[in-house]
């Protein structure tokens, strides 16, 4: 079971602003900051850490869970407004399973950030 994930980012301030906006629909907040480290999560527990640096290669793919499809859409909209690049608009991905509803955005360093809801639409 994962406890947290850390990413090296080229422009710390730009990436911090991106993640603050993009993850807000999921309830994530900036919960810690030490120099050029920032942690995003709930309460005092960071789940995503970013650190300013020079290398972000290779890019990674991180998927966050959402409890409903509206949160997936809200993430996508917020991430694009914060400077992310479209890598897959919100929608069903039946190649994974019938109810896999996800959106994909590339962060400022090219990391693929996904938010996915596995709950059927008629469950809401």
Image: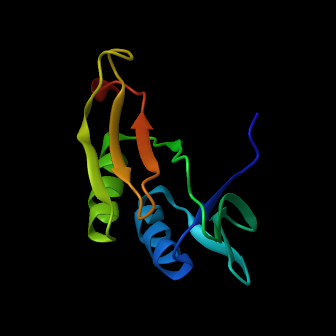
Q: Nearer the viewer, residue 87 or 67?
A: 87
Residue 76's spot in the image, x, y percent?
30, 54
The N terminus sits in image quarter: top right
Check the image and report above or below for 65 versus 106: above
Residue at 73%, 84% (x, y): give it. Answer: 35
Residue 59's spot in the image, x, y percent?
51, 48
Q: Is residue 30 left or right of 22 when viewed as pictured?
A: right
Quadrant in the picture for residue 110: bottom left
Check the image and report above or below for 3 versus 93: below
Q: Is residue 29 left or right of 117 when viewed as pictured?
A: right
Q: Is residue 3 left or right of 16 when viewed as pictured?
A: right
Residue 25's spot in the image, x, y percent?
42, 60
Q: Is residue 32 left or right of 16 when viewed as pictured?
A: right
Q: Nearer the viewer, residue 26 or 56?
A: 56
Quadrant in the picture for residue 68: top left
Residue at 26%, 41% (x, y): give it. Answer: 88
Q: Nearer the viewer, residue 72 or 4?
A: 4
Check the image and report above or below for 31 versus 66: below
> What is the image's colouring?
rainbow
Total marks drawn?
A: 0
Residue at 41%, 65% (x, y): give it. Answer: 108
Residue at 42%, 28% (x, y): give it. Answer: 118
The C terminus sits in image quarter: top left
Q: Nearer the viewer, residue 57 or 27?
A: 57
């Amino acid at each position: 079971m994962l406890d947290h994930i850390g990413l090296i980012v080229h422009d710390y301030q730009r990436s911090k602003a991106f993640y603050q906006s993009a993850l807000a629909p999921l309830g994530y907040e900036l919960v810690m900051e030490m120099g050029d480290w920032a942690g995003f999560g709930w309460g005092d527990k960071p789940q995503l850490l970013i650190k300013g640096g020079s290398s972000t290669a290779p890019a990674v793919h991180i998927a966050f869970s959402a409890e409903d499809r509206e949160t997936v859409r809200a993430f996508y909209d917020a991430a694009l407004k914060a400077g992310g690049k479209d890598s897959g608009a919100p929608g069903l991905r039946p190649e994974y399973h019938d109810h896999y509803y996800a959106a994909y955005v590339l962060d400022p360093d090219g990391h693929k950030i996904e938010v996915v809801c596995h709950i059927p639409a008629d469950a809401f």
